[in-house]
């Protein structure tokens, strides 16, 4: 009986580990990002910098002047049904292109800079393919846009979500190998 339980435990652990590595994620950093010129560019860049700096070197972004060479492409539209949306393109378990759309206004009401930044932070979490959480009050909350108040700054819990996705040894080794070889 002990052997059966041990085998079942090992199989379960292997299955969970395999599932974790099948979730899409970036296999390299810095990720090239295109941010269109305009009134909201500074806010988007501030959100990218906040994710990068609070990750303690785990992730980073590099500005691209071209949509074609960028891995994450931001677009700012005047009006939309939601403050933000993300369209992820992945091959097997790795991301290769993500399109992020942010709106200046929703339902005819202009977003404040604080709300726009919160939407940018949330969509960057989506662009990083972070597994969103059920806890309300965080940028990485699944129901971010449905909350009465939407955070516009990263908190420790948001960084924990990032670390759960990107801190696995094999991912860090892959990233380090690419950085050592000079590949971007």
Image: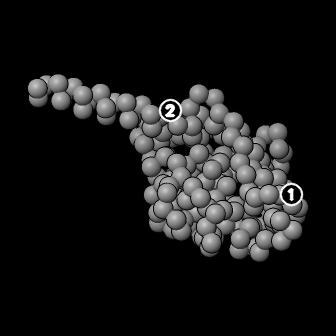
- The C terminus - image quarter: top right
Measuring from the top left, give residue 90's x and y in whole percent.
65, 33
Measuring from the top left, give residue 137's x and y in whole percent.
53, 68
Mark 1, Cα crowd under 10 Å, few <14 / some 14-19 / many 20+, is: few
Task: Give the side of residue 28 with respect to residue 159, left or right.
Answer: right
Q: Is residue 51 visible?
A: no
In what element is the residue under mark 1? Answer: strand
Res 112 → quadrant: bottom right
Q: Residue 179 carries which label?
A: none
> Camera-side residue: 159 or 81?
81
Q: Can residue 151 be seen in this view?
A: yes
Residue on which disc 1 sits: 77
| Residue drawn at 83 percent across, 71 percent down | 109
By what rule are the colours in the image chosen? Answer: one colour
Q: Which mark is residue 22?
A: 2
Task: Give the side of residue 76 with respect to residue 131, left or right.
Answer: right
Q: How many marks?
A: 2
Measuring from the top left, give residue 3's x and y in whole percent.
13, 25
Q: Which residue lies furthest to the left in this view?
A: 1
Measuring from the top left, give residue 101's x and y in whole percent.
78, 53
| Residue drawn at 45 percent across, 58 percent down | 160
Mark 2, Cα crowd under 10 Å, few <14 / some 14-19 / many 20+, is: few
| Structural distance between the alpha carbons of marks 2 and 1 | 33 Å
| Residue drawn at 45 percent across, 49 percent down | 164
- The N terminus - image quarter: top left
> Camera-side residue: 83 or 184?
83
- Which numbered disc flags the more N-terminal residue, 2 or 1? 2
In what element is the residue under mark 2? Answer: helix
CB under 8 Å between callouts 2 and 1?
no
- Relative height, residue 178 to residue 66 (above, below): above
């Amino acid at each position: 009986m002990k052997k059966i339980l041990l085998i079942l435990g090992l199989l379960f652990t292997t299955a969970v580990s395999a599932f974790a590595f099948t979730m899409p994620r970036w296999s390299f950093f810095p990720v090239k990002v295109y941010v269109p010129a305009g009134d909201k560019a500074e806010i988007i860049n501030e959100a990218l910098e906040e994710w990068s700096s609070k990750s303690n070197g785990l992730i980073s972004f590099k500005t691209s002047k071209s949509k074609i060479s960028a891995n994450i492409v931001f677009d700012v539209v005047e009006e939309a049904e939601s403050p933000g949306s993300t369209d992820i393109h992945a091959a097997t378990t790795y991301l290769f292109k993500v399109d992020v759309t942010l709106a200046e206004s929703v339902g005819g009401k202009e977003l404040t800079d604080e709300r726009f930044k919160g939407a940018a932070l949330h969509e960057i979490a989506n662009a990083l393919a972070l597994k969103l959480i059920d806890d309300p009050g965080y940028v990485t909350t699944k129901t971010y846009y449905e909350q009465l108040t939407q955070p516009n700054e990263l908190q420790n819990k948001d960084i924990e979500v990032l670390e759960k996705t990107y801190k696995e040894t094999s991912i860090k080794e892959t990233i380090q190998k690419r950085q050592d070889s000079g590949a971007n």
